[in-house]
Amino acid sequence: MGGIVSMFKTKTILAAVALVAAFATPAFAQEHGGPQIEKQSWSFGGLFGTYDQNQLQRGFQVFREVCSNCHGARLIAFRTLAEEGGPHFSEGQVKALAAEYNVADATAEGGTRKGVAADRWPSPFATDQDARDANGGALPPDFSVLAKARGVTDAFPWWITNYFTGYSEGGPDYIHALMNGYHEEVPENAPHNADGTPFALPEGKYYNDYFPGHAISMPPPLSDGQVTYVPGEDGVTVPETTNQYSEDVSAFMMWMAEPGLVSRKETGFKVLLFLVLFAGLMYATKRKIWQGIEH
Amino acid sequence: MGAPMSEHSTYTPGTGIEKWLDERLPIIRFSKEHLMDFPTPKNLNYWWTFGAILAIMLVVQIVTGVILAMHYTPNVAMAFDSVEHIKRDVNGGRIIQAVHSVGASMFFAAVYVHIFRGMYFGSYKAPREILWILGVLIFVLMMATAFMGYVLPWGQMSFWAATVITNIFGAIPVLGNPILELLRGGFSVGNPTLNRFFSLHYLLPFVIAAVVVLHIWALHVPGNNNPIGVDVKSSRDTVPFHPYYTMKDLYGVVLFAIPFAWFVFFAPDILGHPDNYVMANSQVTPAHIVPEWYFLPFYAILRAIDFNILFINSQLGGVIFFGGSIVILFFLPWLDTSKVRSGTFRPMFKWFYWLFVINFLALAYLGAAPAEGVYVILAKICTAYYFAHFIIVLPVLSRIEKPRPLPASISESVLGKAHA
């Protein structure tokens, strides 16, 4: 008895737990109504994924030079840019960077002062209404957790595999697709309106394959050659293309939303390794104790 | 019966202090009787370890929850950011928060296994009706606790779940509006709602703990049911709880911790919804308002009633079916009157049991599907079958089914299995 039977039951339990978790899903979480979003190969994806420091630094540059003109990141403290596992700038660089910004401080003379490393990223607009006024009525969302506030929807039953691969990169995949999903004119394959008339793009909107409803207020933010990357010390250069920029800034946004990803996974490996070994010992002990008892 | 509940204790106080304590508060005697000597059927399978897993999960949720409450701010302007503050700035905060939110899902996964185990092996039948009823009560309390906990991060799904679910109570005739306003602390979901949900979310787990004590008490009077559902006949059928089941249960707990840790460390947000990373906004309704996965079957039942039934409007009808789908569980011991407990010896019941499981999973799927087209019809069929299982299938089966012969005792069954 014992061994084989118990192991089989154990497997049944594990399978059942996985099944319960698998069936349990917001399957229709988001509908983009556009082409299927292509999943990218992210350095931080999968079990062993970690952030690519160089990519995060480039992504930060794109964010700073382009995105941050309209988008805030109110939860991101300058100091975190120096943290290991992230862009990992030097403390000197971060201090100098913070000092380039003025931050609101009611206790300071005149209500503002130079930023320090402990300050949060200053928002480009004082109020939401100011932001709307400057952007044709649309509110540019804050970037702090945006990469986790967006996702990719897989059709049934394919999302079940996500629970086993730990797929958590739906946000960056969506953002990357969005950045590359602009059309100068409404494409011929655009979905028709409910009444059958051709898709009509409202005034001041742009057509995007991946944006829900396709009419997005944000003009195409990135263009080839827009941001100048500094070549690496070894002379290696990275293409200055929209695709590259969007990959880099998506990675940086994922870091902003989940700055502790690397240390979390590192701890996870230790925990899982411990649990598997511990479970083995527990099983051996359990068998030993139950030896001689018919059950 | 009789055998499981040891009348005379084997405990003899070893030291003077133990003797002194035993005459005043026999807590060591009690622990020895109930945590160590307690005679437990020796044929329990791994499905029975989920009781211990659930007890551990309650402790995990309370411990992580108490720590989270030290850093959380229950105010509509600050709640969202304070959860991010926990994840970013509090030492170990990302893990503690992930254990708590993933823990809620794992807690429900375990409780569903526990409930469906009880349903298959007839653990609700005499003399365990009170045990079953207390279990259903715990399930209801868990749902209330989880729902209010989900509101606390104050994301879009938090806010809209709170709006949709409190609205349910508004459908109750006459008392609906006063109840609705009492729940929300106003005319709409806002800061008073968040505050009372936080307060109750902290209170209810301790109420659950109290009912769990009653649940275990009610378990220890008749003793455990077992996979063949035949009563314990003699001490040869049982083993002491310790070390046999303490060890087996702990092994189960460690195994359960593996998928738990997998989610916590490698995909902490995968069981949630991206929209909850958008701060609550009463002016923007999400495209699809979806509850957490563990509510989906019941949410599907709520939405399935989109038609008026005589003088009952669809909204109230939905509430009645939603409430009824849970209330009916309380009556299960009297709906299934078959004398045979274990599904193993009920050839017809077995099929209908698995059909019920599939139907329940289908309801979960439909709860997440948009309420349109074929999904609406399927949800109605599945809802009807959910109730039919209890009201028609089980009572009829009890009458017409011819169960297979039962083993004379647990020992006989175990020996038969070993020699087979």
Image (tube, coloured by chain):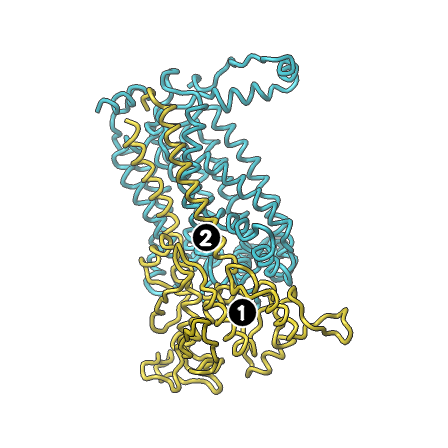
Instruction: Name the residue at 34% across, 22% down.
Output: A291
In what element is the residue under mark 2?
A: helix
Q: Position of residue A71 (x, y in %)?
A: 55, 74
Q: Is there CB contact under 8 Å for labels 1 and 2?
A: no
Quadrant location of the N terminus of chain B in the rendered image: top left
Which of the labelled discs sits on residue A265, or is there none? Answer: 2
Mark 1 residue type: Phe
Rendered view: A84 above or below A111: above
Q: In which quadrant of the rendered view does residue A159 lie?
A: bottom left
According to the picture, the residue beneath numbered tag 1 turns out to be: A143
Chain letter corresponding to the colour yellow: A
User: What residue type is disc 2 on?
Assistant: Lys
x and y percent of residue B198 in the render?
A: 62, 51
Label 2 crowding class (10 Å Cα cut-off): few <14, some 14-19, many 20+? many
Q: Which chain is cyan?
A: B
Tell me which residue sits at (39%, 16%) in the image. Answer: B235
